[in-house]
Amino acid sequence: MKNKMLLLTRTLLKNGEGFGIKGMKNKVSKVLFALMLIIILPGLVVMFSFFVNSAYSALAVIGQEGVIISWGIAITSTVILLFGIFYIAASFYFSRDVEVLLYLPLKPRQIVGAKFLTAAIFEYIITAAVFLPAVIVYGIRSAVGIVFYLYSFVVFVFIPVVPLCLASVLVMILMRFTNASKHKDTFSIIGGTLALLLGMGINIVMQRFIVNINLQELEALITKGENTLALLTSGIFPTARWAVSALLDTATAAGFLNLLLYAAASAAVYIFLLFLGEKVYLKGVVGLSESVSKRNKQNKAEERDKFLKKHSALRTYTMLELKLLFRTPIYFLNCVIVNFIWPVLLLIYMVMGTEGADMQGMVKQLIINTDNAGTIFLFGIAMFAFVAGFNGTVSTSISREGQELFVKKYIPVSYRTQILAKVLSGFILSIAGAVFMLIAATAVFKLPLYISLLILVAGWMGTLLISFFEILLDLYNPKLDWDSEQKAVKQNMNVVYSMVISSIVGGLTIYAAAQFSPGIITAALSAVLIYGGLNVLVYFLLCKKGVERFKQLEG
Amino acid sequence: MIELIDVSKTYGGTVKAVDNLNLTIPGGEIFGFLGPNGAGKTTTIKMITGILNADSGTIKVNGVDIKTDPVKVKKQIGFVPDSPNMFLRLKGIEYLGFMADMYDVSSKDRTEIIDDLAKKFGMEDVLNDRIQSYSHGMRQKIVLMGSLLHDPSVWILDEPMTGLDPRSSFILKEMMRKRADSGKTVFFSTHVLDVAEKICDKVAIINKGRILFCGTLDEMRNSSMKDESLEKLFLELTENEE
């Protein structure tokens, strides 16, 4: 008899769990995805490698280069834990396939095991991006032998196990003993927002401590034993210590023993997870599809009258899109919150640390000189385009329909109106994010008010242009075949493509600003002409090709 | 009235779901659309409602071609899909409000119709709850309500009895009868033959994308020269096809 757990893992992967490559219908999306993987992942590895390399140089002076390995493992484990909590909650409890799996003759541990393995495969990408640079830099610079790389491979294989098990255990216990599973939307929204804030917090700390640290500070930090992150990590993931010892001591039997210990401990933790899954998984998941109903009669008439008032189809459709974006946790985090996170992150980079101070100084210098008003104005316009491209609202608006797309095909509302409502809902969110950023930038850089106002008056054209591009992208390459909302936005390459498009549009604008340093009137006129012209062009393209394409899509 | 003339639909270039189908569904009658699983019932309904595009042929609703004026056709149809699991994050009343705006129903009309239907289906107390919290039958009822807000002249229902309790099922059948009697078109698919036998004025039997029979039950009995139940006639018809 075949191992049911492995069989299930294979089926889940085929069914699109993980990256959904199998679910990609046309060759173009497969090729684009492969290209992204080939370019972005190595890009990340190279980027981190440069950073690790300079850290190595600093650490080597004080003979502490081994810290690279322990930090590498510590950061990888922490990142996997953070991502894991969401991935596991979505996959174990909130995915639509769970209800189907429940009535199959499967043991809970087989479901947990298979779902865990598919999650682990996803985590290897993170592992590769973070852990590989540490291994490569340490390996090359310390001129270690082949054994180090062999050991590293073993560690690589086992790295996701313990953090992901910990995430699974946390989620399973939470679901079993709290009411979280019944209030899944609230749980996801609060949890997701907290995690984003935590992520930003870590980012700020990293900025402060790692990027701007000088040699003396570093030496003091390490000699004083304040190796906080590594210590903290070995507190949370005790097994990581063995992995570090194995990699730093490849010459002796002790190193090998540590490696064995690490592998065995990871396997033991995994087995414990299966055991726990057998005990608590079912109790947490059964009745999940029930959700709480208030059934209150109060304010009934008032509430009812609100929805019985007649509005235009465009307005109601747009409001529906916005409601669903706010009420669906995954959409809320990836389309709404993200809108405000990017601007905040960007400002933090600009305001904090020495590099930030340089940047701030530079911008302020720019602003003092009134000749630069045109350049600054164009920067602002580019920012509006960026913000629109970096939230996945419009670029997933068709994909988010999923199997409900058929409803939009039978309602008597023209495809043009429907497309415009989708653009409009994303446009509203993007504008909110961009204005938020503009206000912050005006305050931080003391932008002259008239420039800010000009940016506000013209910026929407950048937002609209990107939104038009995004809906075209999603109309031609929608991801409709999903069983958990997460796949519609998180595993949707259209989000990445729209970032690329907005970067190109914004980048060209900035390039033009830097190249020609136009005066404010020239800048404003050319922005309005070029962006306005492009908007009109793409709008007509959308009305013709986009509508045609919507017609062809079959629900 | 619904007219399908030489309508074909192929999936993935090879599987012919609907094959040169000709069918006229007049107003004033309850028209049942019967057939085994995978016969092409849902595909046909999806083409009439505009969810799928026919590869060839013409579909007209009250004389309007769906290809030339899809929005006008859709406005005349009230449609109940086979699965009511949609818009789960909306409240029942929000869903109805959305549908009413999509079908351009005035505030006054929608208030009256919603009040009336909610009372009939016993949904008054749950309209302010999210559809997520509804049972399958309640979801079915809210979709049924949504399909009638604009008092459509053509009512198309795909397997409408699934999940309904006996009382609601009875009310639904009564509503179908009332609409047909007032001259409107009622077209529904089912594979519950008992239901079809009791309420249909006419039936069409489809298998492998082709219409095997279309007419009244009496005509069917006459053509087979046997006084048998619909179930037997159905089995004989579809078996000969194998």
Image: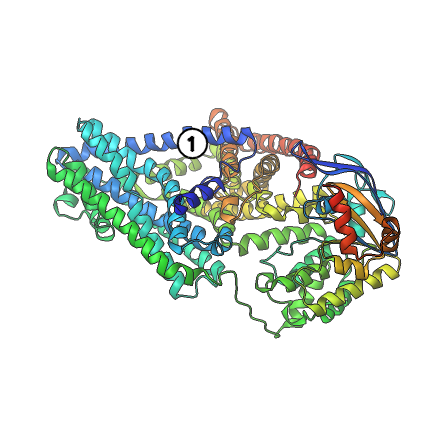
Q: Who is closer to the viewer here, B8 or A37?
A: B8
Classify A30 as above or below B79. Answer: above
Query: Going by the picture, which residue comes out furthest to the bottom?
Result: A298
Q: Is residue A481 left or right of residue B96?
A: left
Q: Secondary structure at mark 1?
A: helix
Image position, residue A81 (x, y; %): 33, 49
Residue annotated with mark 1? A37
Identified at 26% across, 47% down, the residue is A266
Which quadrant of the structure image shows residue B212? top right
Q: Is residue A138 left or right of residue B191?
A: left
Q: Who is closer to the viewer here, A165 or A142?
A: A165
Which quadrant of the structure image shows residue A247? top left
Q: Is residue B149 left or right of residue A352?
A: right
Residue A270 in view of the camera: yes
User: Which kind of residue does numbered mark 1 sit on?
Assistant: Leu
Identified at 69% across, 49% down, the residue is A314
Classify B109 as above or below A60. Answer: below
Pointer 1 indicates a residue of which chain? A
Q: Who is closer to the viewer here, B127 or A17?
A: A17
